Amino acid sequence: KAVVAHFIDARWVKRAPSVVVTRNFDKGEKDRDAVLMTELPDESVERWISKRTVRLVDEVTGQNFAYYESLRLPMLLLFVNKTVDNSAILKLYKQAAKDYQGQISFVSIDGVLFASRKLALGLVDDVLPAMAMNTLDGALYPYPTHQRIDLQGVSSFARDFLGGRLKASHPTASAAEVKAAEDDAASKGAEGLVEVTRATFDSQVMDATHDVVVLFYSAPAKATQDMWPYWKKTVERFRLLGADTLRVARYDVSRNQLPESIELESIPGIIIFPAKDKEPPYKMYHGKAKVRPIMYWVQQMASVPIEFPNDTPHLDAEQREAYIVQIAERDERVGLKRATEKAERIARLSKEAGVHAAGENEAKAGGGHTEL
């Protein structure tokens, strides 16, 4: 009784029997949780303790991610750029976390190193810091990147999530959205482009009868808009060349959750899934964002041979004719320039040789006089 009275006086517990967890992870900072045994939630004491023996805010890495998943708690991930000072945002993040201990795991994560994870959670632009929920059911809850991350924003986001007031982003685009995207692409010259969603990924991309090359993009992103003319031309050229065993597709990461096996280095990104090799690691394109090198890369990676009629598969007959004329004119200009430079160089050397010969003759003539 004396021991219990001591801890009640010290405000560790209100009454007995209780379980107390004290945390002392950070220098000079201590905090604790207590629960009356008779009011313990519908879980074991061991599980209740395990949820509370983690830091209020810790950095998630490849080594401890599995542990956080084992807690079976939703994770609020704060993606940061580790090359800059994040002390201010981590301080407010920790302050917000105190109200949700044992309900949500608050963690930070390297937003550059784990860019693919950031994309998978619905954060599709390059803004850092950024924040999103990592949920048990895979639903997407990205914190709006146009909103400032402050104490009120973090607290409200966590509270609304627990209260069921946050509206999850759909993990896959609807059939209506797919049709609208394909019709829009066709109207702009990309007839035959396949708009892949999370729901159709396995049937459209993992189809062993086709080589499938996919542009992973974010519709609102400027980088995607800059890439679109080249991808549209790629779609058009492969269709006109009759590459029936090749499926050219795109996947909007702003409307669809990424499959777990896909890790992207950046958006937009191009991956080919050959008909006879659908297993990771997947083959990602790292060349120039131009039609011709993309087409040659696809030809090289495809399981089913693709024949090109000439060395300019990205050009139609009229464009190739103009290209040949352009090359001939360029070669003629280069040849003329080189001939002119050669003639000028010969003339210069001849002039230098003439001056040198004149100097020698003058020297010889001067040597015949006798000084008196």
Image (spheres, grey):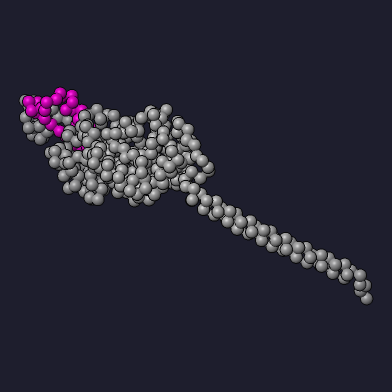
Closest to the observer: 21 or 215? 215
Identify the residue at horizontal 23%, vertical 39% (top origin): 174
- Residue 334 shown left or right of residue 351 in the figure: left
Percent coordinates x, y for residue 250 in the rendering: 34, 40
Identify the residue at horizontal 25%, vertical 48% (top origin): 145
Q: Is residue 135 visible?
A: yes
Closest to the observer: 64 or 113? 113
Percent coordinates x, y for residue 256 in the rendering: 27, 39
Q: Quadrant of residue 366?
A: bottom right
54 in magenta? yes
Identify the residue at horizontal 22%, vertical 50% (top origin): 147
Query: How many numbered markers are drawn?
Result: 0
65 in magenta? no
Closest to the observer: 67 or 36? 67
Which residues make up the magenta segment?
30-57
Task: Indicate whether 352 appears above or below 210.
Answer: below
Task: Indicate whether 44 appears above or below 227.
Answer: above
Q: Quadrant of the C terminus?
A: bottom right
Q: Is residue 80 visible?
A: no
Closest to the observer: 10 or 333? 333
Percent coordinates x, y for residue 265 in the rendering: 38, 40
Percent coordinates x, y for residue 31 in the rendering: 18, 36
- Residue 91 shown left or right of residue 369 in the figure: left
Residue found at the far bottom of this picture: 372
Identify the residue at horizontal 61%, vertical 56% (top origin): 332
Q: Quadrant of residue 169?
A: top left
Q: Quadrant of the N terminus?
A: top left
Q: Quadrant of residue 159?
A: top left
